[in-house]
Amino acid sequence: MSSPSRPAADNADDATAPADSDKLTMSMVQAINSALDCTMAADPTVLVMGQDVGFFGGVFRCTEGLYDKYGPHRALDTPITEGGIVAAAIGMGVNGLRPVVEMQFADYIYPAIDQIISELARLRHRSGGEYFAPVTIRAPCGGGIRGGQTHSQSPEGIFTHVCGLKTVMPSSPYDAKGLLISAIEDDDPVMFFEPKRIYNGPFHGHDNNGGSGSWSEHPLGQVPAGHYRIPLGKAATIRAGSQVTVLAYGTMVHVAAAAIRASGIDAELLDLRSLLPLDIEAVAESVQKTGRCVIIHEATRTSGYGAELVAEVQENCFWQLRAPIERVTGWDTPYPHAFEWEYFPSQRRIIEALQRTLAYH
Amino acid sequence: MPTPTAGPAGAFASKLYVPTGSSRPGETPDFSALKLVSETGSFQPATDCEAGDTVPLARGLVRVLDDQGEAGGPWQPELSDEQLLQGLRHMLHVRAYDDRMFRMQRQGQLSFYIKSTGEEAVAVAQGMALRGGDMLFPAYRQQGLLFVRGRDVVDMMCHCISNARDNCKGRQMPVFYTWKDGNFFSISGNLATQYSQAVGWAMASAYKGEDHIATTWVGDGSTAEADVHNAMLFAATYRAPVILNIVNNQWAISTPQAFAATGTTFAARALGYNIPGIRVDGNDFLAVYAVTEWAALRARQGLGPTVIELLTYRVAGHSTSDNPDAYRAQGEGDAWPLGDPVTRLKQHLIGRGVWSEQQQQELEAELKQSITDAWKQALSHGSLEDGPHWPVATMFDDVFQHMPAHLLRQRQQLEDET
Ligand SMILES: Cc1ncc(C[n+]2csc(CCOP(=O)(O)OP(=O)(O)O)c2C)c(N)n1
């Protein structure tokens, strides 16, 4: 039997506006932990599973304390077999549970790719709507921690290309918690990517490894203690502006914000938060207003998610566009250990793209 | 659907079985689940044996050295004093290297490091039992193979700090070595992928009518990956000349071996694929050498694969990124029943009358000094933080054999900016 369907989190506007007094200072790791704790406390069908998530609390500490609180059955350590983990999660989901799978690094999703793409994503469709598996797959993604090519990847674009998956990437503790709760409560499978470079603080993209603040000094590090949702498919306006629209998500939201500040350009910055479903209304409204668009992501460029955004913006805003759409992305090479700061879309590359865009009249 | 009831595991009265480990912090280590049945004095099968003949070896434990360092039994290899002393030297060299690199990581000079402390006999004895033309498909904890094959330690260090002399050109994390001249395959960060690739290499060797064999290593945790099962199936199907090693060092980061062993031995996995399986005391240099030599002979005779489980213990943390005291009893390693591979070989050599504590100390001091000298030399080619590194634009090389236009454009863009 399947678990009872819930109201789709997408449509819920219930960021149940908790009182300020309920707010705690959290890092993104703590906010994710809090989202897991809230959903596990509320719903016995929710469990977390993956390599080292149980006793150890996860190599990035996202599941810390859940083992003590909920026991080894609900903070479930697993063998090292990503395909096996996802397949088991599908079966558990079909049998009424809501597994939240942790992939130790986004780079290690690939051994599970067949189960995700051919099975998890299509189960509802192929069974004529009879079966579904409400599985959430969490994975730390992105570079900036000297992880080399197999601990730094940003594979989100691969999954937005797959029909039947939702794909989310938060950029702050506040969003991480609200979005993760929505993802877990959603009856569709969700790929939930966590940019590990900003697990412990925002990152402004300075070349000298610096520029990292602490979430405790950031408004979005103030996180409600209890349950709240941020709907999947709604972008956030980080900064309103008139001259150009900047689209970003994950770590790059912070780098883009810093670049915009440094450039003195009056740019509007949207954090997409959810790549699929995409908040095309918010994107179109902004680009129609500014007439210009710069897209930023850390993932490699060719056939990346930015290409999809370019197409959407072009289709929706063609008559308002006053300049070619720009993309600032990682290079089309595997992620290098020694050259992270040259690989990342840097503030300077973003500023140059903004200036090129504005040079069109 | 089960009826929700209140309970510590949540609202269900769960009947799920979840394995436990040899210890968690505060507990007393318990290795009784390992079934350390010593097969010393038992048999060595003929190389053309049936897989079924190896059942007692797959479930038991091949040893040559006893707890006092005395050698005995049918697996005693013919190794000269010089070879044994060489083995001891390699193990001590690896240990000195690991210690130094670990400390350098703590000082911020490396981004990451992985020690092999306590399991040096695996790579060193196995490396010595193979021939130079045999191909190695290691995981990330077999640095000993590089010492046996004579890789320049300065080159290893230069790789680990991604400087201008790093043969990986600044692209790989530390310890993900590659060394074509030594027939040492480029290490992947994705666990176990090399395992089935090694089988393919061995199939090609057989296809070409050559005598070279392939050898590959995987950790106990990584045996869960499908690639390991793929490897066994292909190796058995085509009788590929390959040695499939499973290094059972008890832990996969915080996860006990029980999460992949399922209560049996890893060597016993082989039997279902009709491959001979042997479990060996991985801290017994002589036994590891002998079993590997036997498996290599089998492979060279065209008799196919062997699975070897090397029972050992990961003394240090998984890597520089974890603290093992957070997930296993402090000092669990001291309770490890099979001792330390270096100490056991040293004891044996002293017993043979060809070595002394004094010589041991002198050798340790000598190797420590040579590692210090190598480190200074490595730094003279650049450090991770300050360089010199390879030129940044070389990042675009080697993505393809010839650089396509889009990469040429991106490289130009990068160069214009810097
Ligand atoms: C496909 C894949 N999944 C997960 C990881 C993360 N990871 C790196 S090492 C490791 C533990 C491996 O344990 P084991 O195979 O027992 O080898 P050991 O470290 O004990 O030598 C894990 C889970 C990875 N590198 N690749």
Image (cartoon, grey):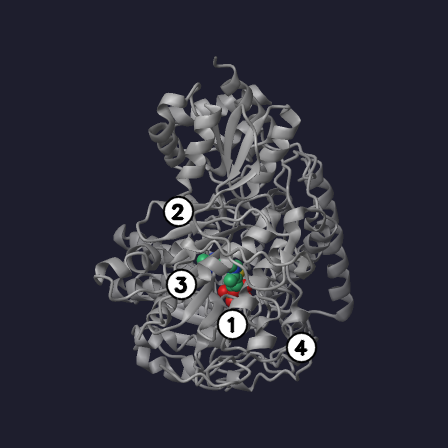
* Residue B364 in the image: above or below residue A147: below
For residue B68, what is the image quadrant?
A: bottom right
Circle 3 crowding by C-alpha within 10 Å: few under 14, some 14–19, many from 20? many
Separation of marks 2 and 3 at Cα, in angstroms: 16 Å
Amino acid carrying mark 4 in the image: Pro
Which of disc 3 and disc 2 is earlier in sequence?
3
Residue drawn where x is 55% and y is 83% of the image: B8
A102 relative to B358 in the view: left or right? left
Give the mark toward the camera: 2 or 4: 2
Disc on res. A276: 2
Disc on res. B25: 4
Which is more toward the observer, B326 or B314? Answer: B326
Separation of marks 3 and 4 at Cα, in angstroms: 32 Å
B23 relative to A287 in the view: left or right? right
Separation of marks 1 and 3 at Cα, in angstroms: 17 Å
Separation of marks 2 and 1 at Cα, in angstroms: 27 Å
The residue pinned by badge 1 equals A42
Circle 2 crowding by C-alpha within 10 Å: few under 14, some 14–19, many from 20? many
